[in-house]
Image (cartoon, rainbow, N blue to C red):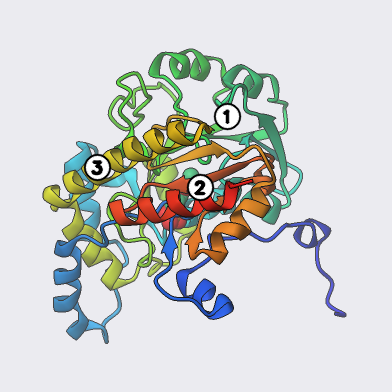
Amino acid sequence: MKLKVPDYISAIKPYVPGKPIEALEREYGISESVKLASNENPIGPSPFAVKRIEAELQKLHRYPDGAGHELVHKIAGKLNIGCENIVIGNGSDDIIALLARALLLPGDAVVLPHPSFLMYDITARAAGVDPVAVPLKDFKIDLDGMLNAITDKTRMIFICNPNNPTGTAVSQSAFNGFIKKVPEDILVIIDEAYIEFATDPDCLRSVEKPDFGRPVVTLRTFSKIYGLAGLRVGYGVMPKDLAELVNRVRQPFNVNSLAQAAASAALDDEGFLNKTIETVHQGLDYLYGEMDRLGLDYHRTQTNFFLIDVKKSADAVFEGLLQKGVIARSMSSYGYPGYIRVNAGLPEENLRFVTALENVLKP
Ligand SMILES: *Cc1c(COP(=O)(O)O)cnc(C)c1O
């Protein structure tokens, strides 16, 4: 290719998403496969959301509401914050990209945990920014390590809480100690994609107690507990001045009309949220019990997924599971070559996974 491409763009390793069910079935010629690889909601989308979309379909010739009035008001009401503190995105990935576009210059640095959500690293690189990876300590985000990684180039710090892929949480008190030591010209971004699944009462919930006395952004998504991953809706909660700035670089119609309507409806669907939490927690309990039975070590989680130490090549186990129609995630590209990650599914999906894993691991 003759085009001149910035070195920092050609250096990006492409994001590898969880394998779609259709891709597995196409490639392996099988059916009835099970996907536990992308931490999706196992019970489906919120029925309130589906119903609302049906009504919305007749208005597809209209542009969406660029301000997302209904959705923003609903979120503000639910979180007891101001509408001016909310920026909506085409998934929370979009908010990360918007923050980068608004605030970062090539040559800056961002501090991020490793392993964690790969989009922090990719977004930094795409902006020509140096991603400074701080290794987890005992599978947990090392807040002291992150403080030590700050230099005069640092412009952002990412915290994934609870962390993907380890499922570990940062406590409110640890965070309070940490945030006091971060210079005020560095933006701290807390990604709470899985916060609704956390059971630990000490887990940091940054929107509920947001008084940090300095700018902090909290990211939330409709892709997990709300069951709307396919629609792409998320949002950031941030100080008004920052929201104003981010809105300047946001595409006016970044969240489509179906997504806005569905997300608004899903916020009211308490029954669905409760059923999701119950399904996930029962699924995790079942899976923990089965891992005990198989003599496998695993990490208890504050999310809807967890890590299993398969004590051999995770890539090989991933491949073996695929052949049995079960999609998990190998953690080798995250730096854990002996671990797989699975999310809790429906009871029958969990059983399929356990049976397949037992078979794959058989000597
Ligand atoms: C799934 C996930 C998200 C959600 O991203 P969307 O763009 O909102 O779908 C964000 N952060 C983490 C850590 C995730 O695992």
* Real-space Cα separation, disc 3 to disc 1, in angstroms: 37 Å
- Amino acid on which the number 2 mark rests in the picture: Glu
Task: Name the quarter where the N terminus is drawn.
Answer: bottom right
Q: Is residue 5 above or below residue 285?
A: below
In space, the residues marked 3 and 2 are separated at their CA atoms by 27 Å
Question: Which is in the foreground here, disc 1 or disc 2?
Answer: 2
Give the residue type that dot 3 points to.
Ile
Label whose residue precedes the other's in the sequence (1 or 2): 1
The residue pinned by badge 1 equals 185
Q: Which sits in the foreground, 139 or 51?
A: 139
Indicate which disc, 3 or 1, sits on the residue closer to the N terminus. 1
Report the Cα–Cα distance between label 1 and label 2: 51 Å
Please give the name of the residue rendered at 36% of the width and 59% of the height, measured from the top-left corner: 233
Q: Position of residue 191 (x, y in %)?
A: 45, 40
User: What residue is shown at x 78% (from left), y 56% (from top)?
Assistant: 8
Q: Is residue 239 visible?
A: yes
Q: Are there few (<14), some (14-19), or many (20+) residues within 10 Å of tag 3? A: some
The residue pinned by badge 2 equals: 358
**Label 2: how many residues lie within 10 Å, few (<14), some (14-19) or many (20+)?**
some
**Residue position for label 3:** 277
Relative side of 125 to 264, left or right: right
**Front label number (3 vs 2):** 2
List x then y, in percent, for residue 301.
42, 32
- Disc 3 is placed on an element classified as helix
Which circle, 3 or 1, is nearer the viewer?
A: 3
The reply to whether the C-beta atoms of the residues labelled 3 and 1 are less than 8 Å apart is no
Query: Image point 32% across, 32% down: which residue?
Result: 207
Q: Is mark 2 within 8 Å of ligand 1?
A: no
Q: Residue furthest front?
A: 363
